[in-house]
Image (spheres, grey):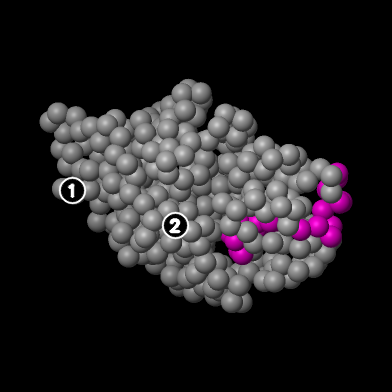
């Protein structure tokens, strides 16, 4: 059953829901991805799913959303949806994708854990479900080696995160707390200066010397390394089995209730895409980069693409226990109070797809619908 009560603490979390991580690529919620021939090819005799003309899918132009990038580029979504058109919107901001989901501008989407938690709690558990996992890892603390030579040197320095209360911001605040240091979460002031900086300008901020490092996802981390920064810490090393959720699949509850076959089709495409990625890493990396170019007009150079892609694990498992831990970290930082996450997961459609594919099923850590 969905949560009946959820309280957001401080105007800092309100800012999380209102401020974009990055400026959107175009007006409105996002930019329509360019149609690639493989992505739009409908097999002869294909039928519509649930009688739908289209299914609207959202994702970010980030390598941590590689399942979506590769699935679009290689045509997995369109193949699974038959004669129902797969349409796409590209986002750079979690709150904007949640807004699009709430308004019906998208039906299903790839998104980070913090926006999913925030969206669910703000709606008192009535707007979305997490229906699958997509990726783990791909987040690093990278620093100026002339200023920071060890973890203890981070104290007193200026470290960037993408946005107040976003997934990486919460992770940095939690790590700072574990060092015994103090930072005011909302202002970012304290033993470490946490500087909320748009990912698109973080490399320039680093080059100008206005920040000493950044706790950021790929490919921003590798872009900084290309500018001379060094990886001081891989966030994966802080988690059990070196796994933590960085990208989930969410769906509106209304769409899930009314069109379960369409949701299963998208999840099948995701499972098939992850199987392809893990069996063909080089080809998948090239496909993701090609879709980045199709969506934004820019592809990543090899010196950034290669290390970034290598640090991300693509998985069907939503790693639900780690999402719960991330919510607890936000509470400890003072950004979230009493997050009632019961019912945030509905993994029955995914487990049905996994069983049919002969793959192991996944667990919701006790946070599934009852």
Q: Secondary structure at mark 2?
A: loop
Tell me how many marks there are: 2
- Residue 98, percent from left and from top: 42, 61
Circle 1 residue:
53
Could you tell me if residue 326 is visible in this image?
no
The residue under the point 84% across, 44% down is 146
Q: Which residue is mark 2?
A: 24
When the figure is inspected, residue 328 is found, relative to residue 140, above or below; the finding is below
Mark 1 vs mark 2, CA separation in Å: 26 Å
Question: Of circles 1 and 2, which is in front?
Answer: 2
> Residue 167 or 368: which is nearer the viewer?
167
The spot of residue 206 in percent (x, y) is: 70, 50
Drawn side of residue 93 relative to residue 138, left or right: left
Q: Secondary structure at mark 1?
A: loop
Quadrant in the picture for the C terminus:
bottom left
Magenta span includes 274: no
Looking at marks 1 and 2 on the same chain, the residue that comes earlier in the sequence is marked by 2
| Magenta segment includes 166 | yes
Find the magenta span and give its range: 148-172
Q: Is residue 342 above or below residue 244?
A: below
Please name the residue shown 65% across and 50% down the image. Answer: 204
Residue nearest the observer in this picture, 5 or 271: 271
């Amino acid at each position: 059953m969905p949560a009946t009560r959820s309280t957001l603490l401080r105007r800092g979390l309100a800012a999380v829901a209102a401020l974009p991580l990055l400026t959107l690529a175009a007006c409105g919620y996002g930019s329509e991805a360019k149609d690639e021939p493989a992505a739009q090819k409908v097999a002869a005799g294909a039928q519509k799913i649930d009688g739908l003309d289209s299914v609207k899918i959202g994702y970010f132009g980030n390598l941590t959303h590689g399942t979506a990038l590769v699935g679009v580029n290689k045509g997995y979504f369109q193949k699974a949806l038959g004669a129902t058109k797969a349409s796409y919107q590209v986002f750079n901001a979690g709150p904007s994708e949640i807004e699009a989901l709430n308004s019906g501008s998208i039906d299903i989407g790839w998104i980070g854990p913090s926006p999913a938690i925030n969206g669910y709690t703000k709606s008192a558990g009535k707007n979305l479900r997490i229906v699958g996992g997509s990726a783990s890892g791909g987040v690093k603390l990278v620093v100026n080696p002339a200023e920071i030579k060890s973890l203890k040197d981070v104290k007193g320095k200026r470290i960037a995160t993408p946005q107040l209360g976003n997934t990486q911001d919460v992770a940095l605040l939690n790590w700072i707390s574990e060092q015994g240091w103090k930072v005011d979460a909302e202002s970012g002031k304290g033993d470490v200066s946490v500087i909320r900086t748009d990912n698109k300008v973080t490399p320039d901020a680093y080059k100008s010397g206005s920040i000493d490092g950044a706790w950021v996802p790929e490919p921003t981390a590798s872009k900084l390394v290309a500018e001379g920064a060094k990886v001081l810490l891989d966030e994966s090393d802080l988690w059990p089995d070196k796994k933590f959720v960085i990208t989930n699949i969410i769906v509106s509850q209304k769409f899930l209730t009314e069109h379960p076959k369409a949701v299963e089709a998208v999840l099948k495409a995701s499972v098939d895409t992850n199987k392809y990625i893990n069996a063909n890493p080089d080809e998948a990396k090239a496909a993701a980069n090609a879709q980045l170019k199709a969506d934004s007009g820019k592809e990543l150079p090899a010196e950034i693409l290669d290390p970034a892609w290598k640090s991300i694990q693509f998985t069907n498992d939503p790693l639900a226990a780690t999402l719960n831990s991330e919510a607890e970290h936000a509470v400890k930082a003072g950004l979230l109070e009493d997050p009632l996450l019961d019912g945030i997961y509905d993994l029955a459609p995914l487990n049905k797809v996994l069983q049919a594919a002969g793959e192991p099923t996944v667990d919701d850590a006790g946070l599934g619908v009852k």
